[in-house]
Amino acid sequence: MSQFLKKNKEVIFLAVETSCDDTSVSVLRATEDAGRLKKIEALSNIVSSQTLLHAGYGGVYPFLAKREHKKNLPAVFEQAIKGIDVSELVFIGVTQGPGLDPCLWTGINFAQELAKKYSLPLVGANHLEAHFLANLLTLGIGEEKFTKTYLPAVCLVVSGGHTLLFLANVIGDYKLLGETVDDAAGECFDKAARILGLGYPGGPAIAECAKTYSKRTWGGQTSPTGGSTSKEAGIVLPRPMINQKNYNFSFSGLKTAVLYLHQKQTPETQKSEGYLEAMSYEIQRAIVDVLVTKTKRAAVEFGARSIIIGGGVSANEELRKEMKKVAKELNVEFLAPAPDLSVDNAAMTGAASYFAWRVGKASSKPEDLVSDPNLSI
């Protein structure tokens, strides 16, 4: 492996992502210098979203997602390799976990067939690490500069299926600090939005509604106290586990609090713009407050050089704004992936599979790779 790295300045490879409801295939190029990554870039990164398909369920329906992955993968693959000489591919990477087991297996089976067809080794990628490494793709820098500038880092991965904090000392060396004990933050957004009738996906719907909450009136009238903030409008939600000394998260109770508070309102209030916007604001603030508070405390405790976020919820503007404030306050760096790299995509899977391949985790027998839906960092 080391001799190969020294002789080859570029490594072209393919990656497949089907951990949830996005079907994605990417072709990437890693430029190396004596075995060290100078730059990794996506030559293609095709994503087919199933969001509209699952909207009626208020969340992802696993076996429907599996069926769509199976249908979409061939077309997405053909788009991804357009203009690419597949004979130049060195290996194939695929998301191994965590994720929805039926979905993971669909991508793995597809990648296995490709690996056999092109006689290429197959590499399993950790989806959580991939969200972290999406920032490497966004920055367009090599691992040496990335390590010296940003590591050690406290990393928050927050999405519909995951909410966890881990410490990244170097690429490949991680320590899990805490994770959700029930609902993930993104799942809470989805369920809260469904309760309010705001549609799916919940995160963007609530964020959009929260933007204008203070400009509206309470059901055509001023709010009960004449104020415009969610608190003045009588809406106060809990911040679960925010003061606990551990780094775990819990958002199930917040979802329940939203449900109970919503049920107390009159039918007219439940449909009023002022109420929906105030509720959306408070839901978003509650989730962001918990995420930011715990991340900040971890950054201080572990002497982090930076705060790094990833995952679909990392695209939330309020979360990014508050994390930037914390980073400035602590005099540390802040990183968040580009919006198109925040959601699930094969380019970030490729970044994770590249580092796994480089340390010898490629399998020459593609059929040996199995799904690991509960894989952790």
Image (spheres, rainbow, N blue to C red):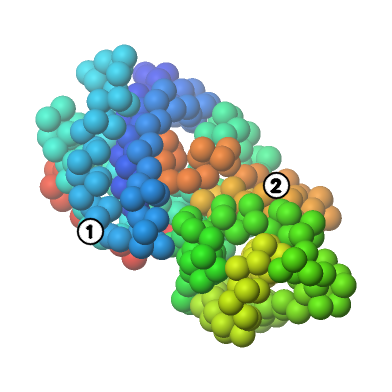
x%, y% of residue 304? 69, 56
Q: CA distance from mark 1 to mark 2?
A: 37 Å
Relative to 223, is 149 on the left or the right?
Answer: left
Question: Mark 1 Cα within 10 Å, few/some/many (few <14, many 20+)?
Answer: few
In-front residue for pair 139/91:
139
Q: Which residue is mark 2?
A: 334
* Any part of residue 45 in sight: yes
Q: Which residue is mark 1?
A: 63
* Amino acid at pointer 2: Phe
| Residue 185, picture quadrant | bottom right
x%, y% of residue 258? 59, 77
* Amino acid at pointer 1: Phe
Q: Is residue 79 above or below residue 178?
A: above
Tell me which residue sits at (24%, 38%) in the image.
Answer: 73
Tell me which residue sits at (42%, 36%) in the image.
Answer: 347
Tell me which residue sits at (24%, 31%) in the image.
Answer: 75
In-front residue for pair 229/33:
229
Question: Mark 2 Cα within 10 Å, few/some/many (few <14, many 20+)?
Answer: many
